[in-house]
Structure formats: C-alpha cells, structure tokens
Amino acid sequence: MKKIDLDSQHQLFYAGFAITYWIFFVLLIMNNFDRKKNCNIAGLVFKRLYSRNLTQIEVRRLILDVQNILCDDIDTCTEAVNAKLTGLGWTSSLVDSVTFELIVYLIENEWTKDSYAFH
C-alpha cells in the first residue's frame, strides 16, 4: 500500500470539502427552483380561478375546501369534488380537471393555510 504524504492528505481533504460544498450548492439551487415552480403553479391556479370571477380570498378558501374534501376521501375525482363544493355553497362545475390537478399538486407540495397570502 502506498503511503500518502501530508500534502496529499491536505489536498484530498480540500478536494472532499470542495465536492461537499458543490453538492450542497446544487441542492440549494434545486430547492429554490422547486419553490419557484410551486409559486408558478400557484399563479396558474389563481389566474384560472380569477377568470371565473373569484377574489383572492375566495380562491384561498376554495383551495382549503378542496384540501378538506381530499382529506376525507383521497380518491375523489373532479366531478365528485365539484359536487361536494356545490354542497358547500360554491357554484357548480367551478373546478375543471386541469385546475383540480394543479390544486392537488399545490396541496401535496407545501400548501399551508398561510401559503400564498397576499399582503
């Protein structure tokens, strides 16, 4: 087995440190990218629901209602969600299949009661 001198050990240490730092940096960038992607999806949801004449507060309440419906039955389809939303006082067929899938994505990825609040 080859003996490694002190300078080689320092070089290996610094190379390992540099690789660890680079991996941390890449993971940090990826995490920020995911957050930006979530914000873009939230923007799409809000835009789609604004086009149906909902206000900001109503959009947030609708998303929370969909979240509560999904908590009761995870295998709920778009039609069943719309029926339950109608029972809660929302207009019929408010959520189309694309908007529903975007809302489900938001709920599964960092949606909280205080998320996407407007000041």
Image (spheres, helix red, strand yellow):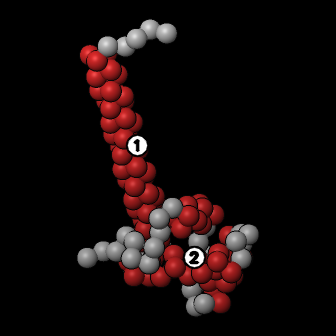
Q: Is residue 95 left or right of residue 55?
A: right
Q: Quadrant of residue 87?
A: bottom right
The amino acid beneath tag 2 is: Gln
The label nearer to you, 1 versus 2, is: 1
Query: Which element is circle 1 on?
Result: helix
Q: Residue furthest top?
A: 2
Front position in the image: 27 or 84: 27
Up-down: is 91 above or below 3?
Answer: below
- Decide: few, some or many residues near mark 1? Use Cα within 10 Å; few <14, some 14-19, many ≥20: few
Front position in the image: 18 or 32: 18
In the rendered image, which residue does mark 2 sit on?
67
Front position in the image: 15 or 116: 15
Quarter holding the C terminus is bottom left
Q: CA distance from mark 1 to mark 2?
A: 29 Å
x then y, percent, for residue 69: 64, 80
Query: Which element is circle 2 on?
Result: helix
Which circle marks residue 99 in the picture?
Answer: none
Residue plotted at (56% across, 64% down) = 108
